[in-house]
Image (cartoon, helix red, strand yellow):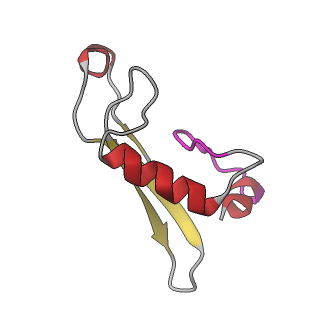
Amino acid sequence: MLADFEAAGSRQDGFFGGADFVYEDWLETIQLAEAGLGLPQGFVPYIQLISFAADGQAVGFSQSALWLNDHLLQEGGGYRL
């Protein structure tokens, strides 16, 4: 999945992976984040979704904050597509 985004030159804003990306660890991280657990300071609970084409290829992802803190209310943000 990550290789497809990199090969296409797609932006990965909001994606907290990297060269050492492990899919199972990422799944655990986003499950905890949705519950508001294990978040870095200043982060709010969020949900991440991946869209797949019929052939199983990842074609996009979105991230949405489940509520807004003062920073997000004043500066904007809370979502990524």
Q: Is residue 55 magenta?
A: no
Q: Who is closer to the viewer here, 31 or 75?
A: 31
- Residue closest to the far bottom: 55
- In the image, residue 48 above or below residue 76: below
Q: Who is closer to the viewer here, 49 or 8?
A: 49
Q: Who is closer to the viewer here, 21 or 48?
A: 21
Q: Quadrant of the N terminus?
A: bottom right
- Residue drawn at x 44%, y 51% as measured from the top left: 30
- Residue drawn at x 60%, y 75% as measured from the top left: 57
- In the image, residue 25 above or below residue 15: below
- Residue drawn at x 55%, y 66% as measured from the top left: 59
Tally of marks: 0
Q: Quadrant of residue 11?
A: top right
Task: Tell me where residue 58 appears, x and y as whole percent.
Answer: 57, 69
Q: Left or right of 69: which side holds 55?
A: right
- In the image, residue 28 above or below residue 68: below
Task: Tell me where residue 17 appears, x and y as whole percent.
Answer: 64, 46
Q: Left or right of 48: which side holds 26?
A: right
Magenta-highlighted residues: 7-17
- Residue drawn at x 56%, y 44% as measured from the top left: 15
Q: Quadrant of residue 73?
A: top left
Report the magenta stretch's main SS.
Answer: loop
Q: Is residue 14 magenta?
A: yes
Q: Left or right of 58: which side holds 66?
A: left
